[in-house]
Amino acid sequence: MALWDGRFGEGPARAMLEFSESLGTDMAMWQEDVRASVAHVVMLGEVGILTSAEAEEIVAGLGKVADELAAGWRPGIEHEDIHMAIEARLGEHVGELAGKLHTARSRNDQVATDVRLWLRRRMLLLDEAVAELMARLLDRVERDGHALVPGFTHLQRGQPIRLGHHLLAHVWHLSRDRERLRDTLHRVNRSPLGAAAMAGTPHPIDRSRTAELLQFEAVLENAMDAVSARDHVLEATADCAILMAHLSRLAEELVLWSTREFGWITLSDSWSTGSSIMPQKRNPDAPELVRGKAGRVFGDLQALLAIVKGLPLAYNRDLQEDRTALFDAVTTTLACVRVLAGCIESMAIHPTVDLRGDLSLATELADFLVTKGVPFREAHRVAGGLVKSVEGDPRGLAALTADDLRQAHPKLDASALAWLDPEKAVERRSSRGGTAWDEVLRQVGLLRASLR
Amino acid sequence: MALWDGRFGEGPARAMLEFSESLGTDMAMWQEDVRASVAHVVMLGEVGILTSAEAEEIVAGLGKVADELAAGWRPGIEHEDIHMAIEARLGEHVGELAGKLHTARSRNDQVATDVRLWLRRRMLLLDEAVAELMARLLDRVERDGHALVPGFTHLQRGQPIRLGHHLLAHVWHLSRDRERLRDTLHRVNRSPLGAAAMAGTPHPIDRSRTAELLQFEAVLENAMDAVSARDHVLEATADCAILMAHLSRLAEELVLWSTREFGWITLSDSWSTGSSIMPQKRNPDAPELVRGKAGRVFGDLQALLAIVKGLPLAYNRDLQEDRTALFDAVTTTLACVRVLAGCIESMAIHPTVDLRGDLSLATELADFLVTKGVPFREAHRVAGGLVKSVEGDPRGLAALTADDLRQAHPKLDASALAWLDPEKAVERRSSRGGTAWDEVLRQVGLLRASLR
Amino acid sequence: MALWDGRFGEGPARAMLEFSESLGTDMAMWQEDVRASVAHVVMLGEVGILTSAEAEEIVAGLGKVADELAAGWRPGIEHEDIHMAIEARLGEHVGELAGKLHTARSRNDQVATDVRLWLRRRMLLLDEAVAELMARLLDRVERDGHALVPGFTHLQRGQPIRLGHHLLAHVWHLSRDRERLRDTLHRVNRSPLGAAAMAGTPHPIDRSRTAELLQFEAVLENAMDAVSARDHVLEATADCAILMAHLSRLAEELVLWSTREFGWITLSDSWSTGSSIMPQKRNPDAPELVRGKAGRVFGDLQALLAIVKGLPLAYNRDLQEDRTALFDAVTTTLACVRVLAGCIESMAIHPTVDLRGDLSLATELADFLVTKGVPFREAHRVAGGLVKSVEGDPRGLAALTADDLRQAHPKLDASALAWLDPEKAVERRSSRGGTAWDEVLRQVGLLRASLR
Amino acid sequence: MALWDGRFGEGPARAMLEFSESLGTDMAMWQEDVRASVAHVVMLGEVGILTSAEAEEIVAGLGKVADELAAGWRPGIEHEDIHMAIEARLGEHVGELAGKLHTARSRNDQVATDVRLWLRRRMLLLDEAVAELMARLLDRVERDGHALVPGFTHLQRGQPIRLGHHLLAHVWHLSRDRERLRDTLHRVNRSPLGAAAMAGTPHPIDRSRTAELLQFEAVLENAMDAVSARDHVLEATADCAILMAHLSRLAEELVLWSTREFGWITLSDSWSTGSSIMPQKRNPDAPELVRGKAGRVFGDLQALLAIVKGLPLAYNRDLQEDRTALFDAVTTTLACVRVLAGCIESMAIHPTVDLRGDLSLATELADFLVTKGVPFREAHRVAGGLVKSVEGDPRGLAALTADDLRQAHPKLDASALAWLDPEKAVERRSSRGGTAWDEVLRQVGLLRASLR
């Protein structure tokens, strides 16, 4: 029996029921719904809107429903949503007293409360998972980060760097994702309970008390805001989208690095799959899926923005769709973080790329000249000319002689040749944030501290 | 046993299996998968790659699997996707012969084929559903379309129109959606089967034959194109997004028109719901959900575009995500079209809005002056001045006297007062596409013909 | 002369120059570019990489260039971007010494620094503008907020509320936008300067010093992160998108409220426009444009996410596009906030909607019964039945007699009739966050305090 | 003097003027606006609404305005949009007769007409540009397409293919983009002129005649549809987005192939740029920008969808934003197509990748076994085992002896070794759409024919 039976004549068509039901999505929130109802009833009992006995009986009944749900009981589609289903089930346990559960409450504030509780828990899990991924990356920085690799811009070799320097950039990206999640959490963790439909209630409820019972940081001060606000949903999804953008960049690099052409890493068999037709393949499915799922989460964010756009207050049914997108974004992101942590932990990293003579050392010559007082632009031009002179020579810059240097610029003496050693080139970049090993280790320390 | 067991040592981790499986989505394609496999095997038998007996046995086995699936059998997650699941099940029926099913085929062309078959069927259903919605709207145009209502721009009353004129605009929108679906269908309905992984096959297959068996219009001529192309997926989803944009505009109007403030229509109880706290509410849930789901489908399109962007050929696992978004977009859109048809058919349309004296008749005065040779811009200014003179008067333009008109402009004689009759104003707009009733009926005729 | 002339033979084609130049966008950052260069050169002078005299001469030269730019001088397209243009112009003032400006710096960290400075300034302006809009709304709450209007859910009348209660919901939305902007600002306001291309530099620079000179809160600790990070760009744009979602909701309501059908407000002529054909129109162009521009900013966010997705580190030219989207999002949002403040301040708000007997009072009957101990669900059903009994009666619930009530439920005595007074209904909702006037004023106090 | 001066008291604020003006965008349509006005006036003269003399004078005046615009005259912001600016300028040439130009027309149908004319012209240019890009790719297929390269799935080497086979996949992608553009063009090329504001007009206009003069294929039959429809804008932008998705995939490959690690191509200097700090860099800026601009066009599409969503008919000012996004999408896409054509034409393609012994030949062994009657799944397993046995051996499959093969499977005799020759492997894939050279050439023929 649907809730509108008091007035409607014919009842909603079955097709409408199927179109509008949200049980498939809402089911994920049953624990939060029970928890919020318990807090509500406890408060109703404390302020005298229900008697203590009534409150206790309803709380006990809700406990039974929770046990049943935990044991696998699932309501049918006729209940429209999880909230109605739980109340109906409660009625089977406590009779018409169940009709008092919804006193001084509306589905609007009820759903808003459940979603915030659901989201709070998942954001904490996400924060933990990101910390774990950071830790796995830091492990690899310490274990394999000393290796020399070309640093890229435009996917062209730019300058030699330590692999750890590169991996650390991803860790710093993630560290800001955690900052964002925590900032957002403060806006998620506020209580709409007690707002009722949008106007508050004539009953003497205590909203601070339910907020306290549910461990909310604050009470949303305006009832219409409490039920119409979706900025916390948008913001949490935007956090996920930004995090997924970061993961997609790391995933892209894992895909590139595991090609035959780059050959820097081999993903473990656990995080790869084979091919139905090509038996030699070890496909980087896990990072590819992460990269693809970034697009999915971006789509969730765009869906939410488009859904919310131009909606008058307070509540419109369009907003039911917000959970589909939010839940998908958060659970997808969580899975991706965990999967990448597995990939990072288990992949093999291969020995150093041989960068002797590599054209990516050309900047060293320019920097050498700068130390001799040559303006950078001129130094850059000189180094460019030398690169051009060895193009096509497989030895690269290793083909240059002291004579070549001198002819290119009078201040480019033989000592500049020593600057072309890749190890030295890297260690010379010891400015704050540079690729020298001590700088790498200093950052590992900072980041480890942030994880504690 | 996963397909890559021949080489991989440890096998994929359970977490990876869960992360990468697509059974939940693929399941929707089991019929297409069986059908495409049957066509493939029939062809293999005809060209002699399989013996007739082998082909017949496999076809029979596939039939059994199909029967089991139809009867409710569902494979477990260890099968990764529906394609592997069906082949494995086939093996339980026909033994190692099942291993020949995949001859001269790859999962790449197999999946590409299944998706195109799935999509073709749903696009045809969508085309039918849109035609049905158009028919229901045309019914209302004929039945209720003579009513006078204000036509809006900027949601401000602009000019009196027939309701049918307004409803017809939506029908024309939808008629172009059908054009689009049909254009797209030609690009969807081409066969990738036989492309194998991306390079074709050394076996003497007959791709025309499988295309014929599966009723494809054409064969995709390049194997790498066949497995890497996703433009048909993007295009079909874009069609859905555009259609949903149209539905959202119609839905918005149903919401507006069913407010107390507009009061033009009452949605039937079947397509409304009540409120948990406010017993008088008859909420336009169905159109609100349609409007919200438009955002969802836009998100699906953006997800797909982002997923495809920058992917090197031929296949990357990111593309597995395409089905999640495509299937969601198409099935959501189909449901929305059907639900709106129900709303349109069953809603009550209330009598004509009283437009006597309404300021939306001001254009009539300007047009009157134009017929007297006054330049439009001057006529417009004169009419504007008259509107200003009656602002605040509840009678509106009905407060104007012949004297008022004459003072406003010498050519604005008493006969202009007759132009202010809303019925006449509407009938005067009999230019092609205008709001006069004959024009409305002419268009109904054109549109009915397009539905036949 | 382009910078790559040292090596390239033919130089870039004109078409490429046009395709790749970003002067049109970058021009907005010239002040930031000069400022960052000055800080860089001051530091180079302090640490001895340049002599004091060199540093002073370059700083003076940059001052001249800044004066020229402020006076309207604009570089030509041959300069590719504003950074090269300024350096080239500096060369015309100080000769080859200009070639030392770029010492220990790359365009990567230079551009990253400029963008952060640009963004920091605009976010502060945006924060101010939002505060101003909140203040204008609070003014209207105090001046006009006592008026009774129906509160809507599903755009159906739900319960009577004070207009101020409704407007406050928007103010609370905006208050969280300011929180978000400030949280983001901490992540924007970190210094990438000194990261060079991605690997740091061999020269003994002092990154803390440039950070201090530019009033950055912190130094980005990893050079590759410093030049590859775009999460601050994504986050700031997401903040704008969420803010625009809020503005679009307010704008939608202004459009609705200014219709003839609602008639709650009249926008001032300053923020409306007329029609070229319909002289009586006063179109709510300003809020409509705000609503439309919300879509534009959503598009900017989606563009940015798609651009960043899957990009390998450190820098790729794709990222040049980030400024087009970011600058558009931020400046569009700022303009919309200001325009809405103008609309809010200048609009006329009309007297109270007459809600006597309005069906939106039905909840009062249910709440009355709840105070008599009747379970809410039963009370809701009773009230629903009473609504049904008066449907079609123009008096609405005012048609109910004491007898009608008693027949509906034994506990629904004559005193319940008094509960149907809209003023009393509103004042009864004095729970925290409810629509009673004292609650409205309490929130105004809280929000005013947040603006100080 | 703005058009609403007849009624409004104070006139719009300067801020509103700046916020709402669209001259910057509309300016691009001045030719279309003049052309459409000329057609309108010619028709007005023909049907007698204007006298022949009036019509001729206005047409002549419009010609003068056009000449002035062509010569560089630009209207000021006070004109709000290009349409008002041209009419005002006309007034300076022909006096108050200019006030008759707008007879039986509204800005709604005027703008709708201009946009369709603008879009039609650019879509034709886009179609040509795509054809040109296809031709340049086909040139490279013929010139360089015989080269052997690994075909990738998951960016892992899958099977040896001809480079031409791979390039052709892109050409086929593009061929469908042209189909889409042409399908869309039929929906763009319909005339809204004469719809007036939304209701038609009382004046005896001839809409077929203006359609004919403007070379429209058809007349939009419903006036409200004519001014409210934006599906052609959405569809054209979706076409651009899909085309950009294709270009981004080609661009990604150009970036990858031009890395030191792949080394397949070298972009010409004309389409690359250097680095401000690293003198050896030749950056693939052109394809990177194309890839980035794909995100931009996706953003335009999302903006448009969000803008149109939920808009009631007929016209709302939100829609002014449609041109910003549409124009940007179309002009960006056009530029990208042309730039890629330049890259493709001028890049150097390097000799064949050495694939002897490459693991991507493993499928050959499986296919060999299939020809011996071994079920594919078993053959796949056998080949997988052989791959595993040579992992780590730099010779790859070339390390296998006849003995190794026989031990792996009794039917794998010595003749299988010959199957491992890459050239033969490629030529064996001569099934329709396969990578054999004759198949490549056959497709070149088909595609060349489509360009004629």
Image: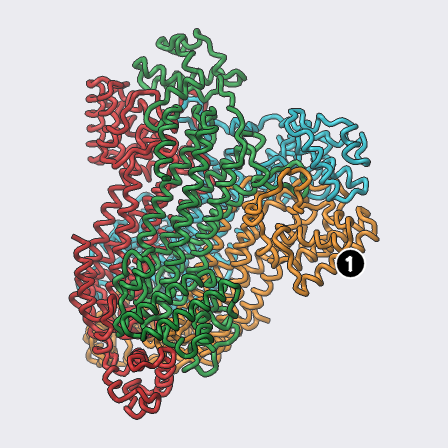
Chain colours: A green, B orange, C red, D cyan
The answer to whether residue A227 is visible is: yes
For the point 32% across and 20% down, the residue is C203
Q: Does B351 appear above or below D94?
A: below
For the point 56% across and 41% down, the residue is A271
Q: Does A292 appear above or below D161?
A: below
Q: Is residue C444 left or right of residue D363?
A: left
Farthest residue to the top: give it. Answer: A403
Residue B448 spot, x, y in % from top left: 55, 73
Occupied quadrant, residue D410: top right
Residue denoted by label 1: B60
- Mark 1 chain: B
For the point 25% across and 79% down, the residue is C355
Occupied quadrant, residue D132: top right
Residue D286 spot, x, y in % from top left: 46, 34
For the point 21% across and 74% down, the residue is C427
Q: Nearer the viewer, residue A260 or D143?
A: A260
